[in-house]
Amino acid sequence: MSPETTIDLEKAKEHFAKVMQEQIRRVSNISKSGEWLDYSKLKKITIGIAGGDGIGPIISRETMRVLNILIDEEISSGKLQLKQIEGLTLENRIKQLKPVPDEVMEELKACNVLLKGPTTTPEAGSGVPNIESANIAIRKAFDLFANVRPVRVPSQGIDWVFFRENTEGEYVLGSQGIMVAPDIAVDFKVISRPGAERIVRLAFEYAKRTSRNKVTVVTKANVIKTTDGLFLETARQVAKDFPDVQWDSWYIDVFSAKLIDEKRRREFKVVVLPNLYGDIITDEAAEFQGGVGTAGSANIGKRYAMFEAIHGSAPRMVREGRGEYADPSSLMRAAAMMLEHIGYTEKAIKLNKALDICTQYEAKLKITGRPDGATAHDFADYVIATITDPRLNVKWDSYQKNPPN
Ligand code: IPM
Ligand code: MG
């Protein structure tokens, strides 16, 4: 940068003031967000299914086939409705230059929960208009503050549940950073006390309710002192309300190292962490279970929830003509989380057991993402056959006792 470069600091200050005002408004709304929706009080629950981009329509189609069989009685009796939502595509987003086209947003709002296929997020500098990610826009629009991501590998003693903060951190202003000078880029990270408190509390409540009784808080509070410092300090306060739940605090660097330490990693149970760390760590964690294609994700707010795969739309697979070989088990796991969230626990358990058998215990079909592996369609047939097998519980119990290596 030459010394003569004039820097318009006033413009940067104005931008900063504007985005901070928005943040102050957002955070003050957190405490006004009302009670949790009680799904059992709804006469009918409408489940929206949006295919998305890339491999999204393929894995959604297969998940829908499984759901239609798993909850056929509830669909016939009108208690549950599956509603296909078209139009959440990159093409439409570019047309309207909006992360979620208006008419699609209206349809999403008319549902009680959403099962969403992956959507492509344009990258800065890729030539595609720099629209915000649809995921992030939906998370923000419905205030889906908790991103819950389980990873289980019974044969290795891995049973983790990650609680990723989903509405703050580097993400909340991720598309509103500024170039304060031609050569200086600044992004923002925002963490608020109520924002940290609600996710940490949910993690502790979950640890208590499921008798896991252990929470690990992951930050980089030694370096990122203000935001991560507040997250950790909030966790310290919340922990006092849960005397029976043990907790510890780790820095993200060494935590990610310990995840590959075979003995140490078994001790982690419930993990709570700010947004970006949660994004990165959950992809790493899913790798132990067979890759991101096997992991589901729940985005939970008090009045709405969205369930999805933890991965993206895999444009490379589609470009190379391998879309039909995508692993749909990520979205099927997400569907199980959805059924549990809306009170259909038995159905969720059934689907999870079938998926354990099909992906880990028996694993008759291997999905490799390539023509040497099974297609998403064949895999869904395998899951359907497993769900409808009267010996499902017996089979699962015996595998559970003697997990194959
Ligand atoms: C995820 C994804 C998203 C994220 C992308 C698609 C915006 O990676 O759900 O983890 O970063 O949150
Ligand atoms: Mg991610």
Image (spheres, grey):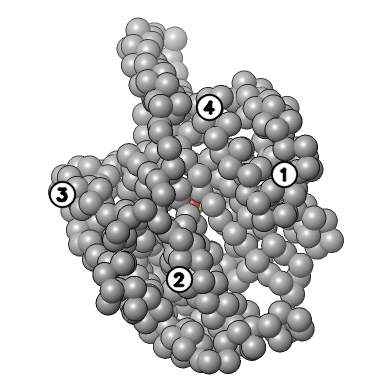
> How far apart are the alpha carbons under marks 2 and 1?
27 Å
- Asked if the residues shown at circle 3 and circle 1 are in contact, with their CB atoms under 8 angstroms apart, the answer is no
Q: Earlier in the sequence, mark 1 or mark 4?
A: 4
- Judge the density around disc 2: few (<14), some (14-19), many (≥20) Cα neighbours within 10 Å: many
Check disc 4 and report the residue beneath it.
Answer: 194
Residue at x-position 71% and y-position 86%: 398
In the rendered image, is residue 53 in sight? no
> How far apart are the alpha carbons under marks 2 and 4?
32 Å
Q: Is mark 4 within 8 Å of ligand 1?
A: no
Q: Earlier in the sequence, mark 2 or mark 1?
A: 1
What's under tag 1, amino acid-wise? Thr
Left or right for 216, reference 300: right
Residue depth check, mark 2 versus mark 4: number of the one nearer the observer? 4
For residue 55, which quarter of the picture? bottom left
Check disc 2 and report the residue beneath it.
Answer: 332
Quarter the N terminus occupies: top left
Check disc 3 and report the residue beneath it.
Answer: 103
Quarter the C terminus occupies: bottom right
205 in relation to 306, above or below? above
- Asked if the residues shown at circle 1 and circle 4 are in contact, with their CB atoms under 8 angstroms apart, the answer is no
- Judge the density around disc 1: few (<14), some (14-19), many (≥20) Cα neighbours within 10 Å: many
Badge 2 element: helix
Q: Position of residue 6 (x, y in %)?
A: 36, 9
Q: Position of residue 64 (x, y in %)?
A: 34, 74
